[in-house]
Image (spheres, rainbow, N blue to C red):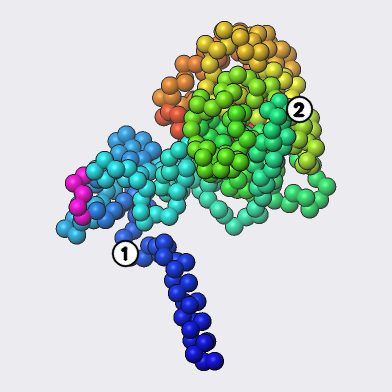
Amino acid sequence: MKAILVAMATVLVSLSMGAQQNISFREGKLVSPQVNNDRTVTFRVNAPKAKSVKVLADWEQNGGQGVMKKDKDGIWEYTTPQLLSEMYTYRFDVDGVVSIDPVNPFTRRDVGNVFSIFYVGGGVADEYQVKDVDHGQVRTVWYHSNTANADRRMNVYLPAGYGKTDNKYPVFYLLHGSGGDENAWLELGNISRIMDNLIAEGKCEPMIVVMPNGNFGKQAAAGETSENLSYKPVMTNFLAHYKDGLFELAFPEIVNYVDATFNTIPDKAHRAIAGLSMGGMHTLMITANYPDMFNYIGLYSSGVDFTLIEKGEVPAYANFDGKLAKLAQTNPKLYWIACGSADGLMQANRQLMERMTKNGLKYTFHESSRGHLWSNWRQYSLMFIPQLFK
């Protein structure tokens, strides 16, 4: 009997070791990234045989690049200039091979690329962190679209305390850009953390945040459809229904589902919508086609396409000036536009504002620095959300 027990124990140990054979515990003295007290950040990578190593990142200084230097032990190191408070993404270029930081387990996917991340605190990035406050919840739900003839996936943030009373809440619809999906605002935008913190700090009203998938030719994010891993993330212009207006015209299906499923206040005064880039174009056209649906509208670096608008061939985009004029007559409480000074879409956004002025539609404009970046879109949300439902 004793021999049998010993044999069984040996088998269990072997199975346990086999089950962990691909696990690296990342132990060791190498630290990367190291966020220093002076807001500089030091990167390190062990590559003794490499000839050239660089950091490729999304901070502003030096174009987001840093040339690393090798010490006698084969450790490459680089320290940034002082950085502003933000969440940053980066990768290493080792002799032309680009990869994530091997000792940093924290990553984000943006379209089809995976990046390592870090935070520099003491400013806006503090709102992206998990704090000791009451937390809301995120539900992943599927709604049926008659227009798409398919079930489609979206994420819904519910504020802390939702469901514990009969309280009803205003709703903020938040749209992603090209290449994004229903997960983008959660993963790259940190929106659930932003909402938890802004609500806890009394900076905004408790609200529901709805994040649908704006890729109307797909049911859900890559890896979350019946195609499973055969559908890999791409920019939306490679997918069906790109800029054909169907997502915009079918948007009431989403609103109706949300109002029927959650404790909402189902009227214009308690609905807001905003989107970045492609989502800004979606927001522009949804509100132009449904002027009585939203009282608060936000365009973040809007990807407005005047070539498509002027053709007038797509029903959702036809009679643009007439639709803007009708929206102006409904007098939305806030129409907020933001774009970076170095953004390639700035000219189109200025042209859009001229058309709005011509058609009597009042708006507020915020010009930030830099270009078409998530750092801007996160910060735009910190500015836009506190203005809602006041």
Q: Nearer the viewer, residue 223 or 291?
A: 223
Q: Amino acid at mark 2?
A: Lys
* Residue that badge 2 annotates: 268
Q: Quadrant of the C terminus?
A: top right
Q: Nearer the viewer, residue 215 or 166?
A: 215
Q: CA distance from mark 1 to mark 2?
A: 56 Å
The stretch of residues the image draws in magenta is 48-52
Q: Position of residue 64 (x, y in %)?
A: 33, 37
Q: Position of residue 324 (x, y in %)?
A: 66, 13
What is the secondary structure assignment of the residue under circle 1?
Answer: loop
* Residue 255 magenta-highlighted: no
Tell me, for residue 267, which label it has, or none: none
- The mark total stands at 2
Crowding around mark 2 (Cα neighbors within 10 Å: few <14, some 14 to 19, many 20+) is some
Q: Nearer the viewer, residue 291 or 9?
A: 9
Could one spot residue 201 in this view of the protein?
Answer: no
Tell me, for residue 29, which label it has, or none: 1
